[in-house]
Each structure stands twice: as structure tokens, then as C-alpha cells.
Image (cartoon, helix red, strand yellow):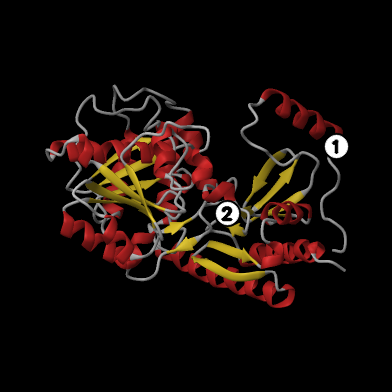
Amino acid sequence: MSTPYHTPSGAASKALVEKGQTYFIPNYKPREMILDYGKGSRIWDLDGNEYMDLAAGIAVSALGHQDPDLLAAFEAQGRKLWHTSNVFFTAPAIELAEALVEAVPFCERVYFANSGTEANEAAIKLIRKWASEQGRPPEKREIITFTGSFHGRTLAAVTATAQPKFHAGFEPLPGGFVYCDPYDDLTALEKMITDKTCAILLETIQGEGGVKPCNPGYLKGVRELCDRHGILMAIDEIQTGMGRTGKLFACMHESVAPDILTSAKALGCGMPIGALLAGKKVAEILQFGSHGSTFGGNPVACAVALAGLKKINTPQMMRHVAAMSERLFAGLGAINAELGMFTEIRGQGLMAGAVLAEQWKGKAGDLSNLARCYGVLVLIAGPDVLRFLPALNITANELDEGLARLKQGLAAAKPA
């Protein structure tokens, strides 16, 4: 295509966009379009324009749109019971917790929340409560996180996020966090550990920080440091989890067992749910009344999440992720060989970041929007990285078509 793929927004779309801009608090800046429905890895807007979805709702729609098994689980539970509160048990939450414990070797108990941020908030409280029960005074309950990390937007989670741009204007921030720089450097990390340290919280791949994977052996090194110093290891797998990297959780590539793991996004395949997976050392720490969530463990969300887990956590799906990963990275490499717009393509599984060359730095948002105009939805990870998080079950044809549209959009950005 020599011209943009999409057609101009119609009157209905424009009117809805204007209402959104009028009535929403302006903390987001959505594209001026109205997404209407999806099927598989394709999605349509209100004006009938079709897009290949290589974003999956920021790694959430792990099985694409309108997956029949997810729809069946949603409808069956939706016709039975939507909400009870945690005053009562429900079968979907129990069954999902059991399935997670069985699927994750180190996990002994599960706490359900509504999002990744809430799961991380629970993890922070659990770490502090564990430290308290160890007899540590408040000044010796510090958590080490890493420059470039992202752990959420609540006040504690955003403080754990070691990126100043997310802190600005929200001071005073809670105490008890220190930041290690650089990420992925065991020597630097060991120098940060003191008698005040009670835990290390990290991502296996820094998603919002630019799709930066850690080197092989790093996670094992962190585990060894935690064991040596008698502190907890907590891993945020909110973006990397649920099959995204070719294992159910990315730490499984190195058989690393953290004390705490947080999951969300793809856990619900589009339904709002988060989870804290607790290992033996901390499984009994949060006792009655110590933490809670009105909607955590919602039966509809849990029913859908269980259906998703059963479908994702199979050898067949993991083989497919590996095959599509190879195709994604090869396709991005071929685009770059022709257009020369990236300095590096990094990531793992179906989580890829294309680092922009010098002349394109700061333009990731513009390029993402241009790609949309050519019929493909992609993300950014900061101003200098294009990010790709397609559905795990994307077909080869869908992926190839999405990459072809991406190439056309990027080519349109280059001067004639």
C-alpha cells in the first residue's frame, strides 16, 4: 500500500471521541479512534477499519479476541454468580488457585487481586509483614528495586518503580525503597544489600523500561544473594508471565524459585484479575484481617482465568509461542535490514522491543501511530523503543500480515 490503510473517522466516531475527551479525566491520551470488536488477532474500529493486533491490550489478550473457550467460561459463570465478596468461598477462585499451585513448583498459596498494581501492592505489604515477624524494626525493612523498573501506579508501587518520571508531582513518596543501578549487574546489586535490606523485587524482563531482558544466570545469582543474606526474592511477572516468554513464567527458564511472584495482565486474558503467588517462607504471613480486596477472586474473572490457564499452559501452546517468536524476531530483522531504523531487537518469546536508531530516537509514539494508519497496532516502551506483544495464539499468516503492514508504515516515515 502506498497510501495509509485506514479511512477517515466517521461522524459517529468523532462524536464519541469528543465525548471521551470531555468526560474522562485526561490522564490518558487515547488514539482518536473507537475500537469496536475483535476476532482472533484482528480488531475493527467503529468505521470498519481492520487492524492486525500486535499489542494484545499490553500483553493482556493472550488468546486474542473472542476465544471460544473463554467465551464459554464467561457465559457459564455469568449465568450463575457474578459476585459474593470474600466472606464466602466460590468454586472458580478455589479451582484457579489450585491450578496455579499445581502449575508453579514453588507456589503454596495464592492471593487474588484485580490488577498487577494491586498484586504488587500486596507483595510489598507481605514483604514488610514478613520482615516485621522476623523482628526487624521499620528502618530495616528496605526493598531493593532497579533503575528502569515498573511495578504499578499506586503510591507504594510507583515508588518501587525506579523511574523519576512516574514520581514527579506525587511526593512525598513512601520510604523504604532503594534503587540499584544498573539492572542486571550482580556486583552492583550485592553492594546495595545492607542490614536494612529485607527483599529484592525485580522483573525478569523490564517491559516499560524498554524491553530489557536480564542475562542468563542473573536470576540464579539474585536467588543466591537472597539466600546468603536471609532476605526475600520477589519477581514481578505481570507482563512476562502466562506463557509470554515460552514458559508459563519467565523465571522457569532458569528453574529459579522466588519467594513471591506477581501475575496479572494475561492471567485473565482480558478480565481484570491479579494474583500473588506465595512460596513456603511467606505462605502463612498474611493472616485474617491483614489484607483484602472487595473484588479480588471475582468468580467470573476466575472462571475465565482458569479456562485461559488450561489453554495456555500446554506443550502445544509453548511450542507455538517458540515458533511465532522466531518468526517475529526474524521478521523484524528483515524489516530492519531494508529500512535500517533499529539498532537492536531484543526480548524473549512473544515480547519484543525494537530500539530505534539515533535519527528516530524520541519518535516511537509517532511511528506507532503511523503504523496504526497502515493497519497494525503496536506499542512503545518509552520514547525510543517499539514494543510488540501479540497474542500467544497468533497465526503465522496473521503475524506476517501484521509485519508487512508495519513495514509499510515505517517506510512511509522515511524521507523520499
Residue 324 drawn at (x, y percent): 55, 68
- 1 vs 2, front mark: 2
Query: Image quadrant for the N terminus?
Result: bottom right
As rendered, which of 386 and 309 lies closer to the eye?
Answer: 386
As rendered, which of 338 and 271 lies closer to the eye?
Answer: 338
Q: Is residue 351 above or below residue 281?
A: below
In the displayed orientation, state which residue is furthest to the left.
135
> For numbered disc 1, what is the local secondary structure?
loop
Q: Please indicate whether residue 79 sits to the left or right of residue 106 in the image.
A: right
Q: Please indicate whether residue 186 sits to the left or right of residue 327 in the image.
A: left
> How would you rate the neighbour count of disc 1 (Cα within 10 Å): few for under 14, some for 14-19, many for 20 or more?
few
Residue at 27%, 43% in the rendered image: 142
Q: Is residue 186 above or below residue 140?
A: below
Residue 189 makes an appearance in the image: yes
In the displayed orientation, state which residue is furthest to the bottom.
337
Q: Which residue is mark 1?
A: 10
Confirm or deny contact between disc 1 and disc 2 (CB under 8 A).
no
Q: Is residue 401 above or below residue 177?
A: below
> For numbered disc 2, what is the local secondary structure?
loop
> How would you rate the neighbour count of disc 2 (Cα within 10 Å): few for under 14, some for 14-19, many for 20 or more?
many
Residue at 45%, 62% in the rendered image: 245
Residue 316 drawn at (x, y percent): 44, 65
Residue 190 drawn at (x, y percent): 26, 61
Q: Which mark is residue 381?
A: 2
